Amino acid sequence: MSTPAEFSKEQQAYLQGLVMGADVARKVRGLPLLSGSAASAGTSIQIGAHSEAPIVGHLPKIHAEAQRRFESQGKKLVAEEIAKRDKDGLEMWSEIAARSENNEFPKGTDIFMTKFHGLFFVAPAQNSFMCRMRLPGGIIRSEQLAGAAEVADRFAGGFADVTTRANLQLREIGASNAMNVLVGLRELGIVTQGSGCDNIRNVTCSTLTGIDDLELIETLPLAKELHYHILHKRELYGLPRKFNIAFDGSGRISSLAETNDISFHAVRVEATQGDPTLSEGIYFLLGLGGITGHGDFARTTGVLVEPSKCVAVCEAILRVFIQHGNRTDRKKARLKYVLDEWGFEKFLGEVEKEFGQPLRNVEQSKFTQPNHIERWAHVGIHPQKQSGMSYVGVVLPVGRMTSDQMRGIAKIASNHASGQIRLTVWQNLLITDIPNEKLSSVENDLKRLGLECDASSVRAGLVACTGNTGCKFAASNTKGQAMILAEYLESRFDLDQPINIHLTGCHHSCAQHAIGDIGLIATKVAVTINDEEEMVDGYHILVGGRTGIDPKIGTKIFDSVVFDEVPSRVATLIQYYFDNRQANESFAEFAARATWPELAVSR
């Protein structure tokens, strides 16, 4: 029999990884450890391998050449690009393990590079890590959610946040628990690799995929296919900047695909009108360049993509972006700015070269894109296309749930449904596949957890980013202030029509303030206190944002309002809506026809 000394380094690393994974799983379950420490082994548990020969250290050829191109023009790479050249983020597992063992946080550009594994050191907001997961399509099983609750209790802050990419984050993770969280999540089958840094973020799709009788096509299979394709392609990491991709099956709940760098909206071709290159059926209409924080939705290209070719088209687009995205100015490093500089014709021409065949540009008259969106189908009780089955959209105020609530939701999904839970881009979740006779039990169990499914509550429409309690960029405590705002409004209004209110802490617009019925973006406001000027929390207030077939960026009507005055200003807007709306008119419908000077006067 072989002894440990006879194993190769690779075999030893593999065995150490197995022991470490087993130890974390055992620690979560309260069992004794197999080794001295659950984070004592350091090994690179890498998904996939380099598919191109590197020419500069570890960098894949396509990235190294892109960096060289900018330098040959006399331009200086930003620090993040130099960090990616100096170190392979995917090979940092051992470093993370060593720091975790020594109770140390990363320093310098290692803070940036550690995000390759989903760990964000959020100082100075907090002296802790945040860990972001990858849940393609927002799907999580009940046993995974219950397991994540145990990880949160033992190694993090005892809660989780649902994000606007239908994803989960754990927060308040101490330095010594970094590896416990990473390996604990992997033991649950949850991936964190590539969920941060300059990588493709969680791939989203239609929340009701597979249970919506109005959708044109199921989109979860495509989200999962792309998810695994990304994980196994080394050159698809370390982009010029982060990248978002979404699929929308044109059903009842929007995936907000138009807010993504790449959007795929399902359309139907019913009559080819003699076009021999086009067959009847379902395609995806390609959109590019969405980034609402910079004032843009994804713009349609007129290109129709067969479902079987979506992943290949995505890779072609990504490869063009990798080669030509700005690596010298982080503020201009998103896909939108390549499109602004080149125009769509040139960009799509380069995509065709990478794709290896012509893209199909189709006149709009040859396809139809249905508008089935029900803006509040993600909250409340709704029938599924499966006979006798329903789903429940659960309200999670500002997207946060405690570990006890996570365990309770998991138990409800297991006891009364199929065990599947779906996170949404609206920071709430759905429990699906509930037999109709069990709906009352589900509602009662949710109430015992302190949760509800009432779409008309103010909290049902609240979306808020992390804020300055956990993000160094945020100018205010958005989650805390969102709850203050909700309490103020709920004491004054009984909403008969739900209203979306989005609060975001900075220009990154993680809460997508620009698409809310009412959107707030944080700022600092100068006020005079005791004859001295001080900077206090405040917000710019927008009205009338919307998504879907006819999206619109909200219009700013109040500028630099101190937070103490924000609740009354928002209440004034809602009262103006009540006083002037037509019968059963939603806030979105009212805002679309109202003139902004009138709303501004309402202050």
Image (cartoon, rainbow, N blue to C red):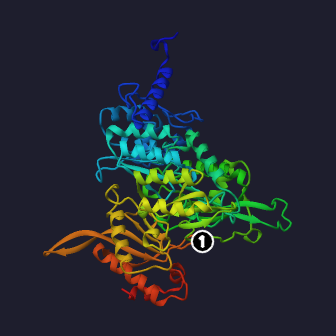
For the point 38% across and 33% down, which residue is it?
A: 97
Q: Which residue is situated farthest in the top direction here?
A: 1
| Above or below, 228 relative to 95 | below
Vertical position of residue 437 compared to residue 137: above or below: below
Within the image, what quadrant is residue 155 found in?
Answer: top left
Instruction: State the image coordinates of residue 402 (x, y, percent, origin top left).
Output: 39, 54
Front-most of residues 92 and 74: 92
**Which residue ends up furthest to the left in the rendered image?**
530
Residue at 40%, 52% in the rendered image: 404
Q: Is residue 70 visible?
A: no
Nearest the camera: 186 or 238? 186
| Residue 230 position in % (x across, y down) | 58, 44
- The amino acid type found where label 1 is placed reads Glu
Q: Secondary structure at mark 1?
A: loop
Which percent across, then down, holds residue 389? 64, 60
Between residue 223 and residue 212, name the one nearer to us.
Answer: 212
Nearest to the observer: residue 426 or residue 539: 426
Q: Quadrant of the C terminus?
A: bottom left
Residue ID at (38%, 63%) = 506
Left or right of 421: which side holds 37? left
Q: Is residue 388 left or right of residue 38?
A: right
Residue 136 pos. (x, y %): 56, 50
**Disc 1 residue crowd, few under 14, some 14–19, many 20+, Cα 10 Å:** few
Residue 100: name its quadrant: top left
Which residue is denoted by mark 1 in the rendering? 374
Whether residue 506 is visible, yes or no, is yes
- Up/down of 196 relative to 546, above or below: above
